[in-house]
Amino acid sequence: MPLKLGTVGHFGITVRDPHKSARWWIDTLNVKKAFDFPGGVVIGSKDVSIVLIKGEPHPEVIDHVSFHLPSMAALKSALAELKRKGVALEDPGDEIGPEAEGSKNVGLWFRDPDGYRWELSVLARRTRKRKPH
């Protein structure tokens, strides 16, 4: 039987100060703190957990991580909230754009205080092909 990947359960990144990073995530992206452990903090939502581990950040090892939002309205609302909270966006003035040249998926990008790059995106709706009559 071929391997089939499931939903991301959790991922870990190294950060300078796990508690300070957890506070940023909680205040900025509305996640919840799950628990502390020696040298780190776990935060997240019902969809994903993020393990913040004390260490030297290496944002260059991950180009970015994207979180899918359910609609364009949700993405626009997230943009307004990020701006209200003073988060520096990657493309000021034209924040929401295609994920890549020619892509119908759209997103916005920003970095956390440790320099990791994050994306909030909306996947384009797939159009159903019509059957010929």
Image (spheres, grey):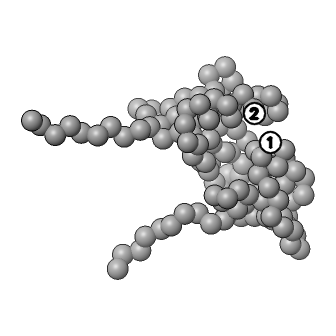
Q: State which quarter of the image contains the N terminus.
A: bottom left
Secondary structure beneath label 2 = helix
Question: Could you give the CA–CA distance between mark 2 and mark 1, rounded to whole angstroms?
Answer: 7 Å
Pointer 1 local density, CA inside 10 Å: few below 14, some 14–19, many at least 20: some
| As drawn, 113 above or below 93 | below
Among all residues in the image, which is located at the extreme top?
Answer: 93
Which is more toward the observer, 118 or 7? 7
Q: Which residue is mark 2?
A: 82
| As drawn, 53 above or below 108 | below
Pinpoint residue 66: horizontal percent, then vertical percent.
59, 47
Whether residue 96 can be seen here: yes
Pinpoint residue 11: horizontal percent, then vertical percent.
67, 64
User: What amino acid type is highlighted by mark number 1?
Assistant: Thr
User: What amino acid type is highlighted by mark number 2?
Assistant: Leu
Residue at 59 percent across and 31 percent down: it is 73
Q: Which residue is mark 1?
A: 28
Which numbered disc flags the more N-terminal residue, 2 or 1? Answer: 1
Secondary structure beneath label 1 = helix
> Which label belongs to residue 57?
none
Residue at 44 percent across and 37 percent down: it is 124
10 to the left or right of 40: left
Among all residues in the image, which is located at the extreme left?
Answer: 133
Whether residue 99 can be seen here: no
Among all residues in the image, which is located at the extreme front?
Answer: 133
Residue at 77 percent across and 46 percent down: it is 30
| As drawn, 42 above or below 87 | below
| Tag 2 and tag 1, C-beta contact below 8 Å | yes
Pinpoint residue 133: horizontal percent, then vertical percent.
9, 35
Pinpoint residue 82: horizontal percent, then vertical percent.
75, 33
Which is more toward the observer, 122 or 108? 122
6 to the left or right of 74: left
